[in-house]
Image (spheres, grey):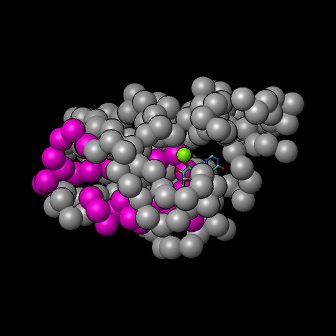
Amino acid sequence: MNNIDDKMKTLISQEKLEKRISELAEEISRDYAGKELHLICILKGGVMFMTQLAKHITNCHVSMDFMSVSSYGNERVSSGKVRIVKDLDESIEDRDVLIVEDIIDSGRTLSHLLEMLGTRNPASIRLCTMLDKPSRREVDVKVDYVGFTIEDKFVLGYGLDYDQFYRNIPYIAVVE
Ligand code: IMP
Ligand code: MG
């Protein structure tokens, strides 16, 4: 493994991050009050964010499913085409769906995914991301809930990886 322990600096502390995630959960709870909300986690990056978010959602009945996609080409530059590595277990037809993602960069993965899931006739489909890097956007995606907007820097932790490691770090770090 490529060790980058000495190059990591805290960008968003666990306390700040989790406070903001609770606020997002409150907003979501208001928007979906009385409804059934189907959360879709985009693996693997979205997993820690989704579990933390879900714990703070109230006023609606929550169900969960998981999906894994990979973009063709290398990890840092998104090609725009996505391949389903693991599809959803359940149908999303007539359900109120909220996609939960770790970070939106070029927007290509999500734009493709939204298009694909839209054809399965959900009642509604919205997008929630922990982090957003709008300066990197190449295709337009409508993001409904954003945790933090960050600059164009490589970040890791709280689900985000560096060569598949560091996902377990409980805060967001930046690599210097
Ligand atoms: P895009 O929006 O299609 O360009 O791709 C977003 C995906 O790229 C995310 O789901 C992450 O897996 C990955 N990604 C983008 N920026 C970072 C980063 O700073 N750290 C770790 N992964 C990243
Ligand atoms: Mg990733």
Q: Quadrant of residue 125?
A: bottom left
Q: Is residue 82 above or below residue 59?
A: below
Residue lying at the far front in this picture: please name it.
73
Query: Is residue 112 at least partly visible in the picture?
Result: yes
Q: Which residues are magenta?
A: 88-117
Give the side of residue 41 with respect to residue 38, left or right: right
Residue at coordinates 74% horizontally, 54% vertically from top-left? 153
Give the side of residue 90 with respect to residue 113, left or right: left
Q: Is residue 106 magenta?
A: yes
In front: 173, or 164? 164
Q: Position of residue 147 (x, y in %)?
A: 55, 48
Q: Quadrant of residue 65?
A: top left
In front: 64, or 165? 165
Q: Position of residue 113 (x, y in %)?
A: 36, 59
Q: Position of residue 130 (x, y in %)?
A: 53, 46
Q: Quadrant of residue 60?
A: top left
Quarter that holds the C terminus = top right
Query: Is residue 16 at least partly visible in the picture?
Result: no
In this rendering, the count of numbered labels is 0
Residue at coordinates 13% horizontally, 53% vertically from top-left? 93
Q: Is residue 16 above or below residue 136?
A: above
Q: Is residue 76 above or below residue 138?
A: above
Quarter that holds the N terminus = top right
Q: Is residue 85 magenta?
A: no
Q: Position of residue 11 (x, y in %)?
A: 75, 41
Give the side of residue 52 with respect to residue 30, left or right: right
Give the side of residue 134 with respect to residue 113, left or right: right
Residue at coordinates 29% horizontally, 62% vertically from top-left? 116
Residue at coordinates 72% horizontally, 58% vertically from top-left? 151
